[in-house]
Amino acid sequence: MSASILSRTALRASSSVVRPTAVRTLASVATSQSAPAEKKANIKKFEIYRWNPDTPEKKPFMQTYELDLNQTGPMVLDALIRLKNEVDPTLTFRRSCREGICGSCAMNIQGSNTLACLCR
C-alpha cells in the first residue's frame, strides 16, 4: 500500500514538473508567430443600399464605405460587423448564427443572393 502512495506522489511530482516546461515552450512559439510582417493595404469598396423606415418620404440610396480587408475576417459578414462597430453605427442588418445554418444574413452580394456569413 505504501508503494502505491509513493508511486502516485512520484507521478504527481513528475507531471507538475513537465507541464510548466511545455507551457513555456508553447508560449514562446505563440509569441514568435504573433509578429506578422506589415502587409500592403487591401482596400475593398462596399456599396450598401440604405433606407430609413423612419423617413419614408426619403428615397433609398447607395452608400459607399472603404475597408482594409487585412484587418477584417474573411467573410462579408465580418466586414459588415466591422463597418457597424467602427465606421457607421447607424448601419443595420440581420445576423444570427454566423455558421450558414439560419439564413438570417441572406443578402444580395455582387448580384447573387447568398449568405453574408459564407461569402468571401
Image (spheres, rainbow, N blue to C red):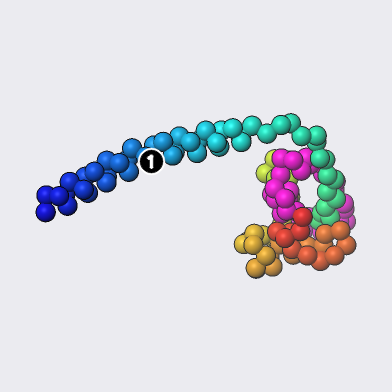
Given residues 40 and 4, the one toward you in this image is: 4
Residue type at numbered disc 1 = Arg
Residue occupying the far bottom of the picture: 102
Measuring 64% from the left and 59% from the top, which residue is drawn there?
98
Pick the residue in front: 73 or 35: 35
The reply to whether residue 49 is visible in this rendering is: yes
Question: Is 56 inside the magenta-drawn segment?
Answer: yes
Q: Secondary structure at mark 1?
A: helix
For residue 46, side relative to residue 10 (left or right): right
The percent position of residue 88, horizontal first and vertical second, equals: 74, 43
Q: Is residue 99 left or right of residue 23?
A: right
Query: Is 19 positioned to the left or the right of 43 in the image?
Result: left
Q: Quadrant of residue 21?
A: top left
Residue drawn at point x = 71 percent, y = 44 percent: 72
Q: Residue 101: percent from the left, percent from the top?
A: 65, 68
Q: Relative to 72, does residue 113 appear above or below in the rendering?
A: below
Q: Which residue is mark 1?
A: 19
Q: Is residue 4 above or below residue 100?
A: above
Image quarter (top left, top right, bottom left or bottom right) of the C terminus? bottom right
Is residue 38 or residue 64 the one in the foreground?
38
Q: Which quadrant: the N terminus?
A: bottom left
* Residue 58 visible from this viewpoint: no
Q: Position of residue 8 (x, y in %)?
A: 22, 49
Which range is magenta?
Answer: 52-81
Q: Residue at x 71, y 40 (%)?
A: 71
Q: Position of residue 87 (x, y in %)?
A: 73, 40
Tally of numbered discs: 1
Outermost residue toward the front? 3
Q: Residue 77: say if magenta.
A: yes
Residue at left offset 44%, top offset 39%: 22
Residue located farthest toward the left when viewing the structure as drawn: 1
